[in-house]
Amino acid sequence: MGNSIAVTQACDFILFGTKGDLARRKLLPALYQLDKSELLNPASRIVGVARNDMSYDEFKQLVEKALNEFIKEDLCDETLARFYQRLDYVQVNMAESEDYARFHQAVHPDHVMVNYFSTPPALFGDICKGLADNKLIKENTRVVLEKPIGFSLTSSKVINDVVAQYFQENQIYRIDHYLGKETVQNLVALRFANSLFASKWDNRTIDHVQISVAEEVGIEGRWDYFDKAGQMRDMIQNHLLQVLTLVAMDPPVNLDADSIRDEKVKVLKSLRRINEENIHDTTVRGQYTKGFLKGNEVPGYLEEEGANLDSNSETFVAIRVDIDNWRWAGVPFYLRSGKRMPAKSSEIVVHFKNPPHNLYRDSYRNLPPNKLTIRLQPHEGVDIQMMNKVPGLGQSTRLQTTKLDLSFSDTFKNQRIAEAYERLLYEAMLGNQALFVRRDEVEEAWKWCDGIINAWAETDEAPKSYPAGSWGPVASVALITKDGRSWDE
Ligand SMILES: NC(=O)C1=CN([C@@H]2O[C@H](COP(=O)(O)OP(=O)(O)OC[C@H]3O[C@@H](n4cnc5c(N)ncnc54)[C@H](OP(=O)(O)O)[C@@H]3O)[C@@H](O)[C@H]2O)C=CC1
Ligand SMILES: O=C1O[C@H](COP(=O)(O)O)[C@@H](O)[C@H](O)[C@H]1O
C-alpha cells in the first residue's frame, strides 16, 4: 500500500458490534494501521456501536485493550493519540429503531457514512430499518456486510432482499476477506500483467489446477456457528470459489469493479453441477478425530467445547470441479480445504502439460511437469518448477527439477504486507467495490454449493474420519489419483 493515495473523502465509520470478537481482533487493529499509514482523512471518525452504556473513556479502554492484544508490533504513540481523537461511542440496541436517532449527534452531515455490520446477519434488517427510519441513509451511505450471507441460496436471498429494500447494490459491500489478501490481489496482476501467462492460460497448456487451503486451527470455540456451516459453507462457498474465479476468469475489459465481477460470475455459471449422480466421484468430506499437531495432542471435532456427539458436519472437503466453458474444457480444478491439518498453508498450483514430444525419453519416461505455485499464505510468493540441465561434461544430459522462486519478503524487503481487513476497510472508505462480492456472485456460488450439500444430505453418509494433524481422509487421495494425478504437499 506504499503508493496508495490517502482516503479522499472524510468519512464516519460506524462499527456495529464493536465489542465483538471480529471487531476487536481484526477491525479495530486494521483501522489503527490505516491511521498509522496516514490513509485516513484527518476528519474521519470511528464510531463504535453496542447495546450497553459506555462512556468515551470506557470505550477508549476497550479499543486500547484490543490494539494491545492483537497488534504484534509496538504501538506508535503519535498514531494512538490521533486514533483516540477519532473515536466516539453510541449506545444502540440494534433492534430498537428509535435508538438510531442518537447517531445524529455522532455523524457529520457532509461525511461519507460507512456502516460496518459486524453482527449476526439476523440483525442486518433491523439495522437498515433503524438507519432508514431516522433518515440516516443518503446517496453516499454505504453498508459493509460480514459473512455468512446465508446458509443456502434461499437464506442468502432473504438477507440480500432485506438489505436491498434500503440500499442500492452500489452501496453494498459484501466482505470476503480472501479478496483483501495481498497475494490474492497479486494473482490478478500475475495473470494480466505478464504476457508469459496471458497466452498460456487455458486447456492447450494447462493440465489441471489445485487450490488448497489447509488450516492448522480447529473451530476455535465457534461450535454453534461452525456445526451449522461445516467446511463447505465456511470456506468453499466463499473463499475457495472466489480464488477459483480469479484463476479461471477471462480478462476483464478493465479493472473496474463490475468488469471484474462480470467475468467472475461467468465462471460460477460455468461450474459443472454436482448432484446425487456424480457426488461420489467428485467429492470427499471428512471430520477430524483426535490427533497430534506439532507434538501436542488435540481433541477431535466431536470432543470440541459444546459438541454434539452425533454431528455429521464436515471439517474437510475435497472436490473435483469442472468448468464447462471454452477455456477450461478438460482441465479439472481440485479444491481442498480442511481444519486441523499439519500446517497452515494456502496455495494455488497450476500444473502445465508436458511438452508435445519428449526428447529426453531415454532417461525420463515422463518429464516432471512445469508447475506454477502461487503461495497465498504463509511465505507469500510465487515459484515456478522447471527442468534444468545439471552442469557437466558427458554424453548424456542429466536433468534436474529446479525452482525460480520469488519470495515477497525477499523481493519487497521494506514493504509491509497489509492485513486483508486493512485493504478492505480502506477500499470501502474509498468507494471501490472491486474487492467485494456482488449479489449475483453470492447467489451463483450458493446455487452450486447447495447442489453438493443437498446431494450429501440425500446420501446420508457420515463424513470420513481423519486424525488431526494429517492431510485429510485417505479417500481424498483416491479422488485425485484415480485421475492419474496427485496432491502437491
Ligand atoms: N469472529 C470472526 O473471526 C469472524 C466473524 N465473522 C462474522 O462477523 C460477525 C460478527 O462476528 P463476531 O464478532 O465473532 O460476533 P460476536 O458475537 O462476538 O459479536 C457480535 C456483536 O453484536 C452485538 N449485538 C448482538 N445483538 C445486538 C443488539 N440487539 N444490539 C446491539 N448489539 C448487538 C453483540 O453485543 P453484545 O456484546 O452486547 O452481545 C456483539 O458485540 C458475524 O456475522 C460473524 O459470522 C466472519 C468471519 C470471521
Ligand atoms: O472465514 C473464515 O476464514 C478463516 C480462515 O482465514 P485465514 O485468513 O486464516 O486463512 C477460517 O478459519 C474461519 O473458519 C472462516 O470462518
Image (cartoon, rainbow, N blue to C red):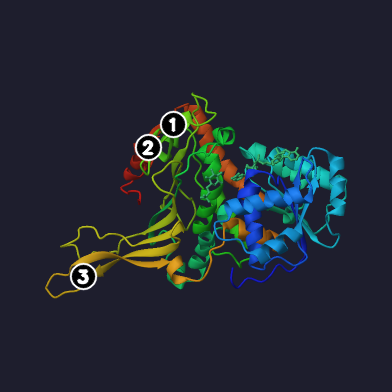
**Which residue in the structure is indicated by mark 1?**
463
Instruction: Tell me the quarter of the picture where residue 124 sits.
Output: top right
- Is residue 134 something that shows in the picture? yes
**Which residue in the structure is indicated by mark 2?**
473
Answer with mark 1 or mark 3, whichever residue precedes in sequence: 3
Q: CA distance from mark 1 to mark 2?
A: 9 Å
Q: Is mark 2 within 8 Å of ligand 2?
A: no
Answer with mark 1 or mark 2, whichever residue precedes in sequence: 1
How many C-alpha atoms fall within 10 Å of the one at disc 2: few (<14), some, or many (≥20)? many
Q: Amino acid at mark 2?
A: Pro
Q: Are the residues flagged by discs 1 and 2 in contact, CB closer than 8 Å?
A: yes
**Which residue in the structure is indicated by mark 3?**
390
Assign ligand 1 to one image quadrant.
Answer: top right
How many C-alpha atoms fall within 10 Å of the one at disc 3: few (<14), some, or many (≥20)? few
Q: CA distance from mark 1 to mark 3?
A: 47 Å
Q: Is residue 136 above or below residue 413?
A: above
Q: Position of residue 257 (x, y in %)?
A: 65, 61
Identify the disc placed on residue 287. none
